[in-house]
Image (cartoon, coloured by chain):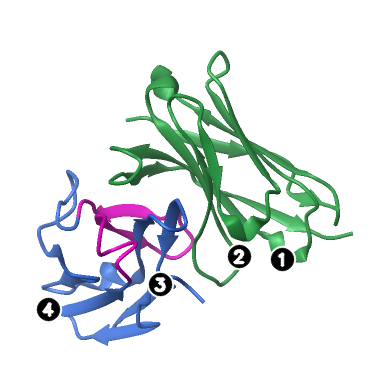
């Protein structure tokens, strides 16, 4: 049981927009920034979004993040087949005094 | 672009100590925080612990104080020791640099990961 809650799966057709939610509490998302990681099949996770909505250099602007209260969302527009991956949210938790992850969302591009 | 490379035994016997090292490609090791994260086969990510740039360390309480993380700046290595392992500790183990502060930081980059299997 993960501290942050994500839907286990999501799917959409190429070119469309999909959003992945991440729900937490006042001790994590509610008081700290949220980060998103993309894990392509068979590879290590890669930073996708940091500080709620900041894209690292090289990440397409099709990817965007937002946060409101104790929840956050990752949006992917103009879906491409190469976006098929697992997506994880993560945040510092003040109660745990460490990082917590969501359980991950497997995105399927139909 | 800094590169991280995990290394260590791929097989550890139950009740023994898992020992891994993460080698950092540049000299930034003393100016950043570092973390270990693991992923059991087919499952999600679990934060193991971190060591700060000042040497302070903390671990996930779920690991029941079995974790030791240390830094050797002369070798540019971060070490992980997990004692009294069981089959539940079988996972791919990743090291990652923490960019930003501890509370507002993020993991970037990550190493490629190394699979450790706990079995007799």
Residue on which disc 1 sits: B88
Report, in whole angstroms, how far the alpha carbon at label 4 lies from the one at label 2: 33 Å
Horizontal and vertical percent position of residue B93: 58, 51
Residue on which disc 4 sits: A15
Give SS at disc 4: loop
Marked residue chain, label 2: B
Chain A appears what colour?
blue
Residue nearest the observer in this picture, A44 or A26? A26
Residue shown at the point (38%, 29%) measured from the top left? B32
Of badges 4 and 2, nearer the viewer stands 2
Of badges 1 and 4, nearer the viewer stands 1
Mark 3 vs mark 2: same chain? Answer: no
Of badges 1 and 2, nearer the viewer stands 1
What is the crowding at mark 4: few (fewer than 14 residues within 10 Å), some, or many (at least 20)? few
Q: Which chain is green?
A: B
Residue on which disc 2 sits: B40
Image: magenta residue range: A25-51
Residue A104, label in figure: 3
Horizontal and vertical percent position of residue B81: 69, 40
Mark 3 vs mark 1: same chain? Answer: no
> Does the segment drawn in magenta span residue A74?
no
B34 lies left or right of A50: right
Residue nearest the observer in this picture, B101 or B19? B101
Of badges 3 and 4, nearer the viewer stands 3
What is the crowding at mark 3: few (fewer than 14 residues within 10 Å), some, or many (at least 20)? many
Residue nearest the observer in this picture, B59 or A74? B59
What is the crowding at mark 2: few (fewer than 14 residues within 10 Å), some, or many (at least 20)? some
Marks 1,2: beta carbons within 8 A: yes
Give SS at disc 1: helix
Give SS at disc 2: loop
């Amino acid at each position: 049981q993960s501290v942050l809650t994500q839907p286990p799966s999501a799917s959409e057709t190429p070119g469309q927009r999909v959003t992945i939610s991440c729900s937490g509490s006042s001790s994590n998302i509610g008081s700290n920034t949220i980060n998103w990681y993309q894990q392509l099949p068979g590879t290590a996770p890669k930073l996708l979004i940091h500080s709620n909505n900041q894209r690292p250099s090289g990440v397409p602007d099709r990817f965007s993040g937002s946060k409101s209260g104790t929840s956050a969302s990752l949006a992917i527009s103009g879906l491409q087949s190469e976006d098929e991956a697992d997506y994880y949210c993560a945040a510092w938790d003040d109660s745990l005094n460490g990082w917590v992850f969501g359980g991950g969302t497997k995105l399927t591009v139909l | 672009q800094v590169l991280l490379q995990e290394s260590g035994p791929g097989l550890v016997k139950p009740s023994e100590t898992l020992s891994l090292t993460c080698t950092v490609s540049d000299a930034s090791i003393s100016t950043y925080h570092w973390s270990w994260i693991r992923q059991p086969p087919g499952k999600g990510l679990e934060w193991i612990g971190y060591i700060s740039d000042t040497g302070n360390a903390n671990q996930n309480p779920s690991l029941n104080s079995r974790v030791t993380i240390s830094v050797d700046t002369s070798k540019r290595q971060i070490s992980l020791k997990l004692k009294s392992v069981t089959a539940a500790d079988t996972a791919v183990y990743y090291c990652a640099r923490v960019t930003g502060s501890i509370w507002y930081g993020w993991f970037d980059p990550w190493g490629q990961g190394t699979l450790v299997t706990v079995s007799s």
